[in-house]
């Protein structure tokens, strides 16, 4: 049976991870990507930074753009209480199908709402579909040229408010230069760069967090 990479990653989780144990799912994926085949999960090094920002923010509402195989969804939701609202968007149905099984293997299926579709289409529907007014924490890990339009869309929809944290993966590699310029340019936000490496490699990469200091854009006009 010829398997695509995401299916081989899922197979490694089913074989090596303990059902209901999120840490073993994370370890199984990292081991697979370090020793068998590279895949674009945020990985263990940047994952530890993601963990620290999530714990520091202790968000009640979380949005993730770019589920891929569910690795960061498992990382984020293993740290947060069941009452947390977590929504993750994935436009590729094959990745979404793998992610659902990875998240289920971790025992987190009741805490994760995975929605298939394009972020540009779904972000304006967040309030209506989920009754969510603002997101306390947003993780960007989808198409890099969508980072800038999508953070603008989140602001225009009033989904970010004072204290909201937006954390973006891959700001150096593959890179999101226009996004970096934007988040580092405005006085209404404080931004911070976390130097790291591209997952499972020694290539330089990093995460950029942006915290809204002033009131939400919809009422700060
Ligand atoms: O494109 C990347 N991620 C975006 C994934 C994009 C989309 O591919 C199809 C699916 O809809 C998924 O959401 C990426 C690429 C590399 N890379 O080294 O090429 C490393 C990373 O951490 C990445 O997140
Ligand atoms: Mg990434």
Image: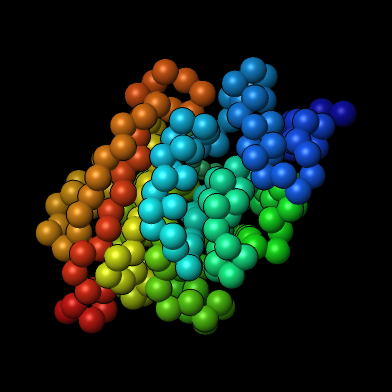
Residue sitting at 21 percent across and 64 percent down?
213
- The relative height of residue 11 versus residue 107 in the rendered view (above or below) is above
Q: Nearer the viewer, residue 29 or 7?
A: 29
Q: Is residue 132 left or right of residue 167?
A: right
* Residue 146 seen in this snapshot: no
Q: Quadrant of the N terminus?
A: top right
Q: Is residue 94 left or right of residue 166?
A: right
Q: Is residue 107 left or right of residue 129?
A: right
Image coordinates for residue 145, horizontal then vertical, percent: 37, 46
Image coordinates for residue 50, horizontal then vertical, percent: 44, 44
- The relative height of residue 211 versus residue 124 in the rendered view (above or below) is above
- The relative height of residue 98 versus residue 165 in the rendered view (above or below) is above
* Residue 18 seen in this snapshot: yes
Q: Nearer the viewer, residue 203 or 107?
A: 107
The residue at the far left in this view is: 187
Residue sitting at 59 percent across and 70 percent down?
83
Residue sitting at 39 percent across and 49 percent down?
53
Residue sitting at 36 percent across and 29 percent down?
196
Q: Nearer the viewer, residue 18 or 109?
A: 18
Image coordinates for residue 181, horizontal then vertical, percent: 20, 46
> Can you tell which quarter of the image residue 138 is in?
bottom left
**What coloring was used for the rendering?**
rainbow
Image coordinates for residue 166, horizontal then vertical, percent: 35, 55
């Amino acid at each position: 049976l010829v398997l695509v990479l995401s299916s081989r990653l899922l197979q490694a989780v089913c074989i090596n991870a303990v059902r209901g144990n999120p840490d073993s799912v994370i370890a199984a994926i990292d081991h697979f990507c370090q020793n068998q085949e590279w895949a674009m999960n945020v990985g263990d090094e940047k994952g530890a930074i993601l963990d620290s920002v999530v714990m520091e923010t202790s968000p009640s509402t979380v949005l993730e753009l770019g589920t891929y195989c569910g690795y960061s969804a498992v990382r984020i939701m293993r740290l947060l209480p069941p009452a947390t609202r977590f929504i993750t968007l994935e436009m590729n149905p094959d990745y979404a199908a793998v992610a659902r099984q990875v998240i289920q293997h971790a025992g987190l299926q009741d805490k994760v709402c995975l929605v298939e579709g394009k972020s540009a289409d779904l972000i304006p529907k967040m309030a209506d579909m989920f009754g969510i007014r603002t997101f306390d924490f947003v993780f960007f890990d989808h198409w890099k040229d969508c980072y800038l339009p999508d953070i603008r869309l989140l602001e225009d929809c009033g989904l970010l408010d004072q204290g909201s944290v937006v954390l973006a993966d891959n700001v150096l590699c593959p890179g999101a230069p226009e996004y970096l310029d934007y988040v580092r340019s405005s006085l209404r936000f404080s931004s911070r760069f976390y130097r790291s490496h591209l997952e499972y490699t020694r290539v330089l990469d990093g995460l950029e967090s942006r915290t809204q200091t002033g009131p939400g854009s919809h009422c700060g006009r």
